[in-house]
């Protein structure tokens, strides 16, 4: 990336720099940095969740899980050691899930904490 000293770092300054000066290699680096920053942010946010927290699911596959709302019933670790939660879905979210998944239950197991956003 081209070395530049900014007296004030702002989204506008960064966008202007990218528009006017960034090379394809710079854009590759920025894409990776953005991905890493997002991952760190979601991990930190997820680590703040506790049993009883009301949360919304995002960035999950299958996509029909995104937007479901529930309460963290328990937390633990996946077989890879990543923090996960079991959610007790709110009635409206359970109804929505039941339309997408025939064997749906009101509890969802193994949801990564980094895919949960606090609703409280």
Image: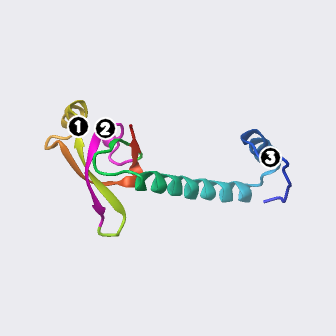
Q: Could you tell which of marks 2 and 1 lies nearer the N-terminus?
A: 2
Per the model, the C-alpha gap separating discs 2 and 1 is 8 Å
**Secondary structure type for disc 3:** helix
Horizontal side of residue 36 vs 115, given as left or right = right
Residue located 67% across and 59% down the image: 29
Front position among marks 2 and 1: 2
Q: What span is colored magenta in the figure?
A: 60-78
Residue located 13% across and 44% down the image: 103
Residue 112 figure quarter: bottom left
Asked whether disc 2 touches disc 1, contact meaning CB atoms under 8 Å apart, the reply is yes
Q: Whole-percent x and y of residue 60?
A: 37, 48
Tell me the quarter of the image containing the N terminus.
bottom right
Per the model, the C-alpha gap separating discs 3 and 1 is 44 Å
Q: Could you tell which of marks 3 and 1 lies nearer the N-terminus?
A: 3
Q: Which residue is mark 2?
A: 68
User: Is 62 contained in the magenta span?
Assistant: yes
Badge 3 density bin: few <14, some 14–19, many ≥20, Cα 10 Å? some
């Amino acid at each position: 990336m081209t070395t530049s000293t900014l007296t004030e770092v702002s989204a506008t300054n960064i966008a202007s720099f990218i528009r006017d000066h960034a090379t394809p290699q710079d854009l590759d680096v920025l894409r990776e940095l953005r991905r890493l920053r997002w991952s760190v942010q979601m991990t930190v946010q997820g680590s703040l969740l506790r049993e009883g927290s009301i949360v919304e699911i995002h960035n999950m596959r299958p996509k029909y899980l995104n937007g479901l709302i529930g309460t963290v019933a328990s937390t633990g670790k996946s077989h890879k050691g990543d923090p996960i939660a079991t959610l007790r879905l709110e009635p409206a979210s359970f109804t929505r899930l039941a339309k997408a998944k025939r064997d749906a239950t009101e509890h969802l197991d193994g949801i990564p904490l980094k895919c949960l956003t606090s609703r409280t």
